[in-house]
Image: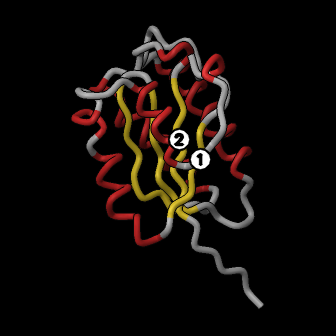
Amino acid sequence: MSTHTQILYQVVFSTKYRKPTLRKEDRPQLFKLIWGLMKNKRCHLYRINGVEDHIHIVFALHPSVALASLVKDIKLSATAYIKKTGIFPDFGGWQEGYGAFTYAVKAKSNLIRYVMNQEEHHRKKSSLTEYISLLEANQVEYDKQFLE
């Protein structure tokens, strides 16, 4: 029998100390790098976007790939790329950890639209407030001292 999965993930991670270093004009280069990495790992990327201090990635994880390994590889590759190219001069690294949330496939369109509209969304809500909302909506226990 073959392996069949249908798990839609949203992963969110921030720059170190949520420092706003990911300039809008250079983010597409970073997103293209992440897309290529995910493609090489046989994951299906539906949408990637973010703002100055964090990134959202919506994707289907290939069954042979561990989520923690994927996120680690994304962060390491992105950091190496940023340092090599100098596209984000003030970038100081990624915050430890990440948020990972699963969704029903029927939520895919709304989730993609939500991630597409990050710029507009963050005119009204800070990234920390957004992240806490995600944790609470998904009933994830957290200690606020580790979110700053």
Other-residue count near label 1 (Cα within 10 Å), few / some / many at <14 / 14–19 / ≥20: few
Give me the C-alpha separation between circle 2 and circle 1. 5 Å
Check residue 84 in the rendering and tell me which mark sits there, or answer none: none
Between 134 and 21, the one lying in front of the other is: 134
Q: Is residue 91 left or right of residue 145?
A: left
- Please name the residue that numbered disc 1 is placed on: 139
For badge 2, the amino acid type reads Glu
For badge 1, the amino acid type reads Gln
Which quadrant: the N terminus?
bottom right
Q: Is residue 48 left or right of residue 66?
A: left
* Image quarter of residue 11: top right
Other-residue count near label 2 (Cα within 10 Å), few / some / many at <14 / 14–19 / ≥20: few
Looking at the picture, does residue 140 appear above or below residue 8? above
On the image, the x and y values in percent for residue 2 come to 73, 86
Which quadrant: the C terminus?
top right
Query: Residue sitting at 35 percent across and 29 percent down?
Result: 51
Query: Residue sitting at 41 percent across and 33 percent down?
Result: 130
Extreme bottom residue here? 1
On the image, the x and y values in percent for residue 91 come to 49, 14
Query: Residue sitting at 34 percent across and 37 percent down?
Result: 28
- Please name the residue that numbered disc 2 is placed on: 136
| Residue contact between numbered discs 2 and 1, judged by CB atoms under 8 Å | yes
Query: Residue sitting at 38 percent across and 35 percent down?
Result: 50
On the image, the x and y values in percent for residue 36 come to 51, 49
How many discs appear? Answer: 2
